[in-house]
């Protein structure tokens, strides 16, 4: 099937609200809400298509934008490549020039609207932070170090240890401050669950949690994460690491291929540091995950 290339705009106003519109019933995925946008014509760049579509559909002039995520998705009747950009500078107030309902929606309420299936990854990319710290244990100096460098909006934490009497108070305190914290194993109350790549491959149905993440290393695992509707993945190793020098990294070009295959946000992990954020994003990453990179 031919791949339809689409420029999609996540228009964000100063208070953080996002502009969404309702697709007409006769359109593909009709009756569902969408982020405004449309097909990239053969003589256009994505930037040009984005500006044209947003002006045609909403009467808004795009002044500034940056890439958020690219999602390749196969509907039974149509294959799409959604090139999604955050439009953070614009002129004019969006209004439905084609008669479509258009509203501003607070980020934390987006999930209550019905979107096409391909949009789940876009929603997650809007909500998730750029940094993910992976750690084998929690202690106060470590937490203080994070607090000095990252706000709860910018950092998520994965603790590779089950909840126990030593870490519970620290985990709850981090969550109370607004950090998203996933711990190893079942932790129903928080709504977060992380699957190792072995657990991912051995799981047939999506566990009933709000946020499901998984570790992936290759195409088979990325496709399995797609099939399970995993919310975000950690893809590793990008480079070889001092702890596993015998394991070759996949390198950024392969990382980019796998990230494009993934329906969801992808964190780059392995042999990279915090200053690799730019190159990671250029290769399709949501951001950087790290173990030693986040140690004080
Ligand atoms: N604009 C937009 N399209 C989306 C989203 N999610 C998603 O799966 N799509 C799919 O992307 C494809 C192209 O989008 P579109 O129908 O807006 O294209 P267009 O503005 O050029 O419309 P037209 O074909 O009516 O002229 C459609 O098949 C649509 O279902 C989304 O959030 N926004
Ligand atoms: Mg459109």
Image: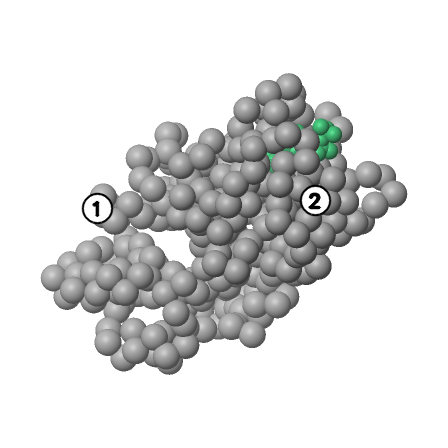
Could you tell whether 185 is left or right of 289 in the image?
left
Nearest the eye: 192 or 272: 192
> Quick one: SS at disc 1?
helix
Task: Residue at 70% x, 44% y: name it.
Answer: 59
Question: Can you tell which mark lies on residue 62?
Answer: none
Up/down of 8 relative to 76, above or below: below
Residue 227 in the image: state x and y as whole percent.
48, 33
Sequence-earlier tag: 1 or 2: 2
Residue 113 in the image: state x and y as whole percent.
45, 35
Q: Which residue is mark 2?
A: 59
Nearest the eye: 226 or 89: 89
Marks 1 and 2, how far apart in space? Answer: 44 Å
Q: Which residue is mark 1?
A: 189
- Disc 2 under 8 Å from ligand 2? The reply is no
Nearest the eye: 19 or 173: 19
User: In which quadrant of the rendered view does residue 188 lie?
Assistant: top left
Task: Residue at 24% x, 73% y: name it.
Answer: 139
Could you tell whether 99 is left or right of 184 in the image?
right
Nearest the eye: 115 or 139: 115
Where's ligand 1: which quadrant?
top right
> Quick one: SS at disc 2?
loop
Q: Nearer the viewer, mark 1 or mark 2?
A: 2
Residue 183 in the image: state x and y as whole percent.
28, 55
- State which quarter of the image contains the N terminus: top right
């Amino acid at each position: 099937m031919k791949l339809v290339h689409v420029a999609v705009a996540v228009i964000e106003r100063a208070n953080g609200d996002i502009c969404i519109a309702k697709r007409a019933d006769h359109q593909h995925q009709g009756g569902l809400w969408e982020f405004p946008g449309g097909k990239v014509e053969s003589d256009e760049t994505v930037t040009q298509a984005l500006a044209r579509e947003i002006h045609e559909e909403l009467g808004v002039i795009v002044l500034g934008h940056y890439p958020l995520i690219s999602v390749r998705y196969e509907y039974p009747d149509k294959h799409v490549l959604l090139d999604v950009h955050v439009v953070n500078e614009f002129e004019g107030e969006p209004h439905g020039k084609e008669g479509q309902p258009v509203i501003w929606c607070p980020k934390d309420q987006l999930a209550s609207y019905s979107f096409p299936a391909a949009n789940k990854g876009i929603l997650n990319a809007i909500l998730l932070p750029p940094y993910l710290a992976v750690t084998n244990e929690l202690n106060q100096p470590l937490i203080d170090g994070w607090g000095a460098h990252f706000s709860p909006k910018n950092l998520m934490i994965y603790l590779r240890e089950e909840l126990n009497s030593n870490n519970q108070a620290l985990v709850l305190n981090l969550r109370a401050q607004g950090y998203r914290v996933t711990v190893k194993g079942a932790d129903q109350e928080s709504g977060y669950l992380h699957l190792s790549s072995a657990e991912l491959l051995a799981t047939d149905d999506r566990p009933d949690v709000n946020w499901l993440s998984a570790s992936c290393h290759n195409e088979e695992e990325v496709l399995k994460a797609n099939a399970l509707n995993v919310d975000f993945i950690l893809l590793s190793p990008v480079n070889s690491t001092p702890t596993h020098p015998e394991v070759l990294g996949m390198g950024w070009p392969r990382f980019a291929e796998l990230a494009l295959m993934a329906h969801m946000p992808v964190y780059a992990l392995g042999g990279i540091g915090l200053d690799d954020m730019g190159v990671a994003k250029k290769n399709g990453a949501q951001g950087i995950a790290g173990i030693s990179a986040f140690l004080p």
